[in-house]
Image: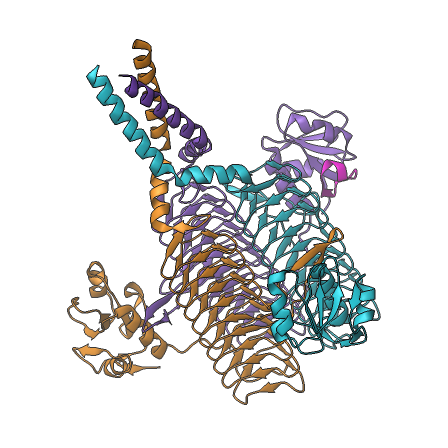
Chain colours: A cyan, B purple, C orange
Amino acid sequence: MKHTAKDLADKIDAVVEGDASIELAGVAAPERASSGDLIFVDAAKHTARARASAAACVILPPGLSVTGKTIIRAKEAKVAFAKAAALLREASIIATGVHPTAVIAPLAKIALNASIGPYAVIGEDAHIGECTQIGAHCVIGAGSWIGDYCRIHPRVTLYANTRIGNRVEIHAGAVLGADGFGYTFGDGRHWKFPQVGIVEVGDDVEIGANATIDRGSLEDTRIAEGVKLDNLVHVGHNVQIGAHTVIAAQTGISGSSVLGHHVVVGGQVGIADHCTLEDRSVAGAQAGIPTGKTIRSGQVVWGTPARPLDRFKEQYVWFARLPELGARIKKLEGQLEAKLGKS
Amino acid sequence: MKHTAKDLADKIDAVVEGDASIELAGVAAPERASSGDLIFVDAAKHTARARASAAACVILPPGLSVTGKTIIRAKEAKVAFAKAAALLREASIIATGVHPTAVIAPLAKIALNASIGPYAVIGEDAHIGECTQIGAHCVIGAGSWIGDYCRIHPRVTLYANTRIGNRVEIHAGAVLGADGFGYTFGDGRHWKFPQVGIVEVGDDVEIGANATIDRGSLEDTRIAEGVKLDNLVHVGHNVQIGAHTVIAAQTGISGSSVLGHHVVVGGQVGIADHCTLEDRSVAGAQAGIPTGKTIRSGQVVWGTPARPLDRFKEQYVWFARLPELGARIKKLEGQLEAKLGKS
Amino acid sequence: MKHTAKDLADKIDAVVEGDASIELAGVAAPERASSGDLIFVDAAKHTARARASAAACVILPPGLSVTGKTIIRAKEAKVAFAKAAALLREASIIATGVHPTAVIAPLAKIALNASIGPYAVIGEDAHIGECTQIGAHCVIGAGSWIGDYCRIHPRVTLYANTRIGNRVEIHAGAVLGADGFGYTFGDGRHWKFPQVGIVEVGDDVEIGANATIDRGSLEDTRIAEGVKLDNLVHVGHNVQIGAHTVIAAQTGISGSSVLGHHVVVGGQVGIADHCTLEDRSVAGAQAGIPTGKTIRSGQVVWGTPARPLDRFKEQYVWFARLPELGARIKKLEGQLEAKLGKS
């Protein structure tokens, strides 16, 4: 959708410097931009890239300048660019209309302006909200609820009774609501513990490709609003994830762990069962958080088993000095032996 | 399926105390139960939760009591609860009948009471056993064999000639029988090594969502009866997994490794190629087991490279004391220098 | 396809010793071979297995011999076996013809001899090359380009505008072109950064089951020719992977990292964002490479944070000796105290 620089700046609380009437039609990296694309830089070292760009308009933070272009001045240039991009670019189309091959159960409720792709299967009593798009080959289990303006990419599976808020985006291959991994051992074998809870996902959540979120066992699994989960993330049964928490690729969270709001979890982190990561805590990539552990609010941890980042770094420095420490002990032993021998 | 407390207790080898005629219709957590739900607690600290519950009947282990309710007394309360749940709850329905959109090859053999969901594709000569349910969008490769009473959730893919036992449950998105990761390097590039073995899965196995189990290269990949694999687990070519072994989410097992029976593997463990984990050994979460390593029967290991848990813990304690050790060495050096200077 | 030993040897630059006219029809492990199967061994300790085999023909490297069989002599026996297997075995059939249930957009261009399986969905303007097979339930996004002789197994998803070279094999459940994990934080929430780049995959690449390769944000994600990615590998936005690089299962590569050619990456490795792994470098299984780090050409690293393998091993040996070092320090302290007390 085309916007003038002025329109755009007004909508993202920014200010235009220079020709505010130029039309913008997209976003790009400086090197790839054509004249109608909006670009941004947020550091002095990148202003030369902006200057050399074909783009006629650049978003800049206070203190930077690029000559010969219209400038949209915003305190947080990258946030402004993200907001502008959302206005300039139409989101990719996942489905248009209800495809005749979609298999929709008689009692499913599909909003009139929702779209369902080829071969999607919508179970009995499922609800699909306004303007929501369901991609090809999705399987939406009976009794599931999907809110408005959601983008469900092809080949997503929702088991029965999964609940999804509004403006949620789920990428291809994700599976929500599969049975949790719960067994109890007796008579030499594992007995399946009942997995009768559901998965609830709040508004504005994004879930990556081939991620898996298990249903609760006797409780529910809950993902609060604004959470972002990367590809191949695993969320176990009964896990609770607070608002605006971000979790990078291939991280796994075991049963009944609780993450607060605005937590940041790196890639390939392992969070064992019954852990608590309080609000705004941070777990570095590949950290391993043992069963039942609590990470305090705002704390940053790394390593397996995870410990405070400062401590990890200090220990790691000493670790690298181990050969030297060994040599110093040996020298002391030699000196002392000589001394003791002498006396 | 409703049962009286007496019926249920008889079937799970337990004993009723109190009104044995009350009817039970489901299972729940104490806080969520209605009067017809069965609950359980297995520790004195939880009896207050049971007492406060609306449930009329509670499974308890010997030594605990909850007043005002029918008690089903069982030595292992959690196992009894799991067994009772399997009797009280009907498993979710994956498919009913053979959907007209299923594409079934002419020579596939589908048991009369098997069910096939919408858009499933069943290859030539495939066999689907009695009462087995195949979910929507499953792809069952030519020549595959699936036993009786299996539950294959939507969007599972079996490559050709995969063999599945009875009462196996496979969750959405799992892929069985893809080519193993085998190449041999020559002339500056990788040549694909033949991957002509198959995957064999025993009875009563459960496989998690988006898990992958590769076919053998010149041998087969074998998963014995009662094995439980969590979501996103990867099993490489020629791997052998013994009976009743349990493997948590995101663990990967490289080619030709052999796991015994009743092995327990935590989440995100990496088992390199040609390893042996003997019967009843345990690998803690995120452990890394190097190529060719053997973990002895009953041994518990942790860390990367994995070592016995006791040793890991001891080393870890010393690791945390490194700064202190460094200070002590420095002090010794100072004292000795003073001493040597004096003499 | 049957070949005589002579035919086969000619085609793989090897030499026959013994009866060159025998017919070969397949490949197998020595223990499983029938007389018409070709086998190989590449170490003296395995020649007994070859001798005991029913196979009439064996590939051997210089210096080994097995009596009573036709020998195909090749400098690199395993490479020769891989090449022979490719000639003897027909690849499994993924699809034949265009299935009537495939949904093909009017402007998609499908080569006349390409095959499309049941329920595949091919988007507008997509291109499917000569002799390429697209499996059941694949979703090929609008504007995507797939070259010649590709093998796309069932249930692969390509988002719009993904580009795939020739002779590429993609296993079931893989997702190419999903949005990268890019957000910028402001006003207490995460704003989606535009993900408008594409994924480009070169010739002769193989991609494992349920792997995920994200589209670029403002740049593209590029996988060069001959790259092999195992199951459940994650490749983030803007990542560049050089020719003939091999990456084992469950490894994750964060945004904008660059891997050279002939790099070898073990399983479950975590490569943070903006890293560089130069040509022919090696990262051991479960290694963790921190943000922005460069691994030099030919260097071998292990551990988290990753360091040169020699250093890792040295430090690890000292790590195991920590309890002993502690005891030696204690002894020194005792001796010195006694000494100082005496003087």
In which quarter of the view is residue B323 placed? top left
| Point 58% across, 56% down: residue | A249
| Point 60% across, 59% down: residue | A231
Residue A107 seen anywhere in this rendered image of the structure: no
Residue A329 seen anywhere in this rendered image of the structure: yes
Q: Position of residue C222 (x, y in %)?
A: 52, 71
Near-viewer residue (A210 or C172): A210
| Point 71% across, 60% down: residue | A61
Q: Position of residue A90 (x, y in %)?
A: 74, 72
Q: Is residue A128 left or right of residue C261?
A: right
In which quarter of the view is residue A218 placed? top right
- Quarter of the figure with the C terminus of chain A: top left
Figure check: B70 above or below B34: above
Q: Position of residue A238 (x, y in %)?
A: 67, 44
Magenta range is B23-36
Q: Is residue B35 magenta?
A: yes
